[in-house]
Amino acid sequence: MMFYPYGFETRIAHHDLGTYRYTVVWLDEDIAAELPFDGQPRLRITGEVADVPIEGAWQPSRGRWYLMLGKPLLKAAGKGVGDEVEVRFRLATPDQLILPEALERALDADPQARAVFELQTIGKQRALAHRVGSAKGPDTIAKRVTEILDALVGRDVPTLSRLRLVVPDPVANP
């Protein structure tokens, strides 16, 4: 078990935002008062929920903060909405990014794609890394890496269009 400076017990809950329903844990109010939310509304963390590792961010909502829990974490913990869980965490470096091995290798092999990848915000880089990291099988991983490389060189990839990647114009920048 790792040491985490913050910890509390809470229940897993649903949080409805518009048409979306998230499974979350709400941050303990006493701990929230200690954290530096005044400098930034979201704080990235690494930690554990019910002894299962998690990386995420405390997200603001009406004066409170929540941490989204994905289905794989809930399944690994054997937990669901209404269950009591222990949450332990530490603040993470906001710009920390760990790339999945397949994406790292692909970017290392393609300096142009690497350069364009590094033009993206840390949030967009994290979204691309998550897209590869959440794939279950080797075929899906390969497909997603290919899609990312295509998008980074300016090809239209519908599954990534919502990210609005910054891609230099090859005509203006030969």
Image (cartoon, grey):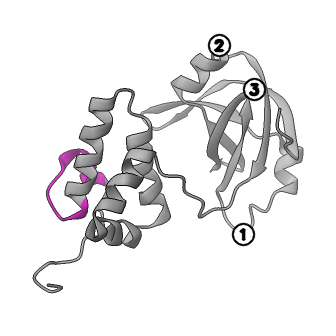
Residue sitting at x 86%, y 47%? 31
Question: In terms of secondary structure, where does tag 3 sit?
Answer: loop
Mark 3: few/some/many CA within 10 Å (<14, 14-19, 20+): some
Camera-near label (2 vs 1) is 2
Residue sitting at x 33%, y 37%? 141
Task: Compute the Cα span from label 2 to label 1.
Answer: 35 Å
Question: In terms of secondary structure, where does tag 2 sit?
Answer: loop
Q: Is residue 104 above or below residue 55?
A: below
Q: Which residue is mark 2?
A: 78
In the depicted view, which residue is nearer to us: 52 or 145?
A: 145
Amino acid type at circle 1 is: Gly
Amino acid type at circle 3 is: Asp
Q: Is residue 134 above or below residue 95?
A: above
Amino acid type at circle 2 is: Gly
Indicate the quadrant where residue 3 lies. top right
- Magenta-colored stretch includes residue 155: yes
- Magenta-colored stretch includes residue 170: no
Task: Compute the Cα span from label 2 to label 3.
Answer: 11 Å
Query: Do residues under tags 2 and 3 come within 8 Å of each other at their CB atoms?
Result: no
